[in-house]
Image: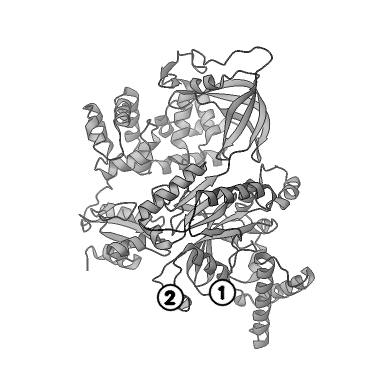
Amino acid sequence: MNGPSTEIINEIRTLRANLRRWQHSYYIEGTPEVSDLEFDRHFDRLLQLEEQYPSLKTEDSPTMRVGSDLSSDLPEVPHGIPVLSLDKAYSLEEVHSWIEKTIRNAGMDLSFGVEEKIDGVSVVLYYEEGVLKRGVTRGNGYVGNDVTANIRTIGSVPLSLSLPMTIAVRGEIFLPKGKFEELNRALDSLYANPRNLAAGTLRRVKSRDVAKVPLDIFSYEGFLDAGRGENLRALSGRGMPESQREMMDLLRDLGFKTNPRTLFFDNVSIQDLESYIRTSTEERAGLGYEIDGLVLKVNELKPREALGYTGHHPRWALAYKFESPEAASTVEQIDVQVGRTGRITPVARIRPVRVGGSTVSNVTLHNQDYVDILELAVGDKVAVSKRGDVIPAVERVLEKNEEGAPVWRMPGVCPACGTALRLVGAHHFCPNRLCPEQVKGRIRFFAAKDQMDIDSLGPETIDVLIGKGLVSSVADIYSFDAEVLGSEPGFGQKKIALMKKGIEESAGRPYERVLPSLGIPDLGQKMTELLIDAGIDNVDQLLDIASRHDTGALTAIHGIGEKTAESVIAELNTPEVRTLIRRLKEAGLSFSARPRQEEGIPQIFKGTVWCVTGSFQSFNPRSKAMDEVKKRGGKAVSAVSGNTTHLLAGEGAGTKLSRAQQLGIPVITEEKFKDILAQGAWS
């Protein structure tokens, strides 16, 4: 086939330019320039030419929005910027207090931006030299799912920018309320609200299906690397943004859709906030999209860097959550649930009722004290809310039952094993560690995705294993014979092979995953990190501390209190926990955070403290790079501080890079790092 002529190349360029302009007018500005017929005629012609000359198709072509029939497994990828949650407030007094504290901590006058908190799906859009390269869901804030193909189908997401910049942009994808009911009726499984439908759509495996749903997006935050040459050149006429207001102006100029209802206050008073919040609350129902609150942000960007972050949220932003909506329902019965630690929790089964856009039928009642405060009985009519628009709660009794049922009382014995319950503090516990519900809970917890992440060993499979007597403790996972399940319905050879593979792979999980997965109360991920950072980096050290009842060795670590230390030591001294650790050791699980020293590896990083940021070609996930540091005697930390000696920075490095540069910490590139590893010495 002959190559494309100059006329064809020029026609393709003209078609793309027209289509991009028309899409921007339609999706961003809301003012269509041409009829649907005219748009489709140009679009179909571009499709035809790109199919005829595939070498001319580009990543940012308007035709990329139609999606593909190819399936995608939505792989996990690391974020290049911090994608944290927000601290929350539920009253004006809390908001005003936060503003005063933030100004005081900044040591200067501040202005603030206030924007609507869209109830949608948070994503990060990564652009390189002006072209969309990756769209990633928020995930856990550090790793999200790559949904680039699906993101490209959203008309309000620019595939290319007006300036060739490298930038990461946070946004909220949502489904307009006007489209929700129409689409929901057409689906076999109804979604409770627009957010759930938007989230389900974004995770579909075929982007062509996503293209059929009119998802939209508001972009609200941009992250620029001031040191990149393409950014400096692109911004030579305007300079780097110094405030959120300027960043929003830049995002709009680049082609992003932003919320026009965002306001900025130079001097925020409680009266201003009351007026704005009251207006937003009144107008909420009439908006074309769902919001569940407002977000306040420090406008100036430099003070944001000084204010910094906690492990959970930025200190320069706050979410004000609207008062939760309420609905009335009737308590039909109250059951009790037995947790993996033996804690007994009463749960109200109420007549199903819609609250805050979703149907509620089960409400946790926490403990007997909570029930007593409500004076709650079966048959009572109650007010049900969703606190923070998430957690269902019984707020108060509206009408007492007509049957004269008394206030509900906790049973005296465990409903699962019949053991007498014990009251510890405000909560009741079943003290029988062999209680079948506790055993089931511990095994489910250990195998869960956020713990050991054992593939093909979900709750239903675990129930079968327990029911067949194959597994009665966590350690049995690594010793039972899976082949005996061959005659069970749903356990074909493929299922059994996947289960065995998942168990085998989990045995190689690092100590940082193994220890918190044991389910020891108070000994979770955070405490595990604190212990390792303090040098208590293997289970034998921990067991020795427990044997000596040395609470001081734990309370000396910042972040571990007296009660936590006592609780952990008591659990580690029980025969059941000691036996579990011994059996898991015998199964080959890791109980030391220190990487196994391989002969001949020089300890070239001894005495150094490393932090990592960005994404890498050779180290994915990037924790693999830190494993190499630790193998060579160095220490890895999660945040840049004055104690950090080196920052390993990959593509898309964010605030950690800026912080390291401020502190004068050496920044090492991936290529330099690989050279050091290969040479076994510093050059």
- Please identify the quadrant where the C terminus is shown: bottom left
- Please identify the quadrant where the N terminus is shown: bottom right
Q: Nearer the viewer, residue 238 or 610?
A: 238
Vertically, is 219 above or below 409?
below
Say whether disc 2 or disc 1 marks the residue closer to the N-terminus.
1
Q: Is residue 44 left or right of residue 364?
A: right
Q: Is residue 663 left or right of residue 65?
A: left
Find disc 2 in the rendering and name its residue.
Answer: 232
Question: Disc 2 versus disc 1: distance between alpha carbons?
Answer: 15 Å
Q: Regarding mark 1 in the picture, which secondary structure is present there?
A: loop
Q: Is residue 313 visible?
A: no
Q: Is residue 269 visible?
A: yes
Q: Where residue 61 sits: x, y (%)?
A: 62, 72
Find disc 1 in the rendering and name its residue.
Answer: 162
Give the quadrant of residue 524: top left
Instruction: Please state which amino acid type lies under the numbered disc 2.
Output: Leu
Instruction: Please state which amino acid type lies under the numbered disc 1.
Output: Ser
Q: Where residue 314 sits: x, y (%)?
A: 42, 52
